[in-house]
Image: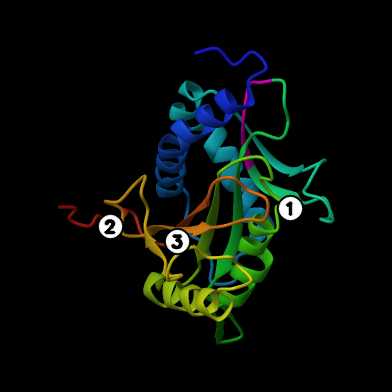
Amino acid sequence: MSFGGNPTAWLDLIDSQVPDILRLILSTWDEMPSLSPDALEDSTTEALCRALRKNRTSASLPFRIDIQIVELDPAAGQDQGRMDITFSPMIPHEAFYFCLECKRLNVTNHGRRRTLGTEYVTQGMFRFVARQYGDQVRHGGMLGYVLDSRVDLAITAVQTAIRARREDLKIAGEGDLRQSSFLPEMEHVFETAHIRDEATSQFLLQHIFAPANLPKWPVRTVP
C-alpha cells in the first residue's frame, strides 16, 4: 500500500490498526501493577505509556506511542488539546493518529466513592465530539481506570451520563454503550458512534473499562 500524499490511505491505515491497538492496550494493562483506590490520573497514564512502549507487540505496529502530545491544529474554534496517549503512524502528517484519553472512575477518597462518570463524558468524550482531539480521523479511544474494580458500577455511571447528554454528544442511534465492533468478545470494551459537525462519516469512540485489580479480562460468548 502506498501512502504518498494520500490522506485517505492514511485514514485506512489507522482504521485497519484499531483492533491491534486495542489488544495492545488490554494486554499491557493486564501486566500493570494494581492501583490504589485514589491513584492519580497523570502518574497512572505515564506508567501505562511506558509499559505500552515496552510491550513486545508494540514493535510490530507501525506507530509511535507518545504521551501528552498537543494537537496543533484542532477544529475551528477549539482550544489546543493535550492528549493523554497517541498512536501516530510514521507518515509526514501530524493530524492522523489514534488518541487514547484516560479518565479515573470510581475513586475512593476518605471513605467516599465518586463515580466521575460525568467527568468521563464532559472532560473526555466531548473533546472528541467537538473535534478538539482527532479532528481528521474516524476513530478514538477512552480508557477508564476503574479504581475499585467495580466495572459494573462504572459502566452504569458512564451510561447514565451519556444518556443525559445525548444531544450534545451527537450520538448516533439510541445512545447506549454497545459492544465494540472491533473486539465484540471482550465484556469491558464498548463503543459509541457520533455524528460530528462537517464530517462525512461517523466517528467511532472505543471505551475500555480497566479494573484496577483484575488479572484477566472477561470474555463474552459471541454467536
Please name the residue that numbered disc 3 is placed on.
209
- Which secondary structure class fits the magenta region best? strand
Q: Residues within 10 Å of mark 3 (few under 14, many from 20)?
A: many
N-term-proximal mark, 2 vs 3? 3
Give me the residue at 42% from left, 66% from top: 177
Please name which of the two marks, 3 or 1, marks the residue nearer to the observer: 1
Q: Which residues are magenta?
A: 86-91
- Which mark is on residue 210? none
- Which mark is on residue 218? 2
Residue 116 image position (x, y, % from top left):
59, 76
Please name the residue that numbered disc 1 is placed on.
132
Secondary structure of the residue carrying numbered label 3: strand
Type of residue at label 3?
Phe
Type of residue at label 1?
Gln
Q: Residues within 10 Å of mark 2 (few under 14, many from 20)?
A: few
The answer to whether 114 appears left or right of 178 in the picture is: right
- Is residue 31 visible from the viewing direction of this image? yes
**What's the distance in space between the residues labelled 2 and 3, CA to CA?**
11 Å
Please name which of the two marks, 2 or 1, marks the residue nearer to the observer: 1
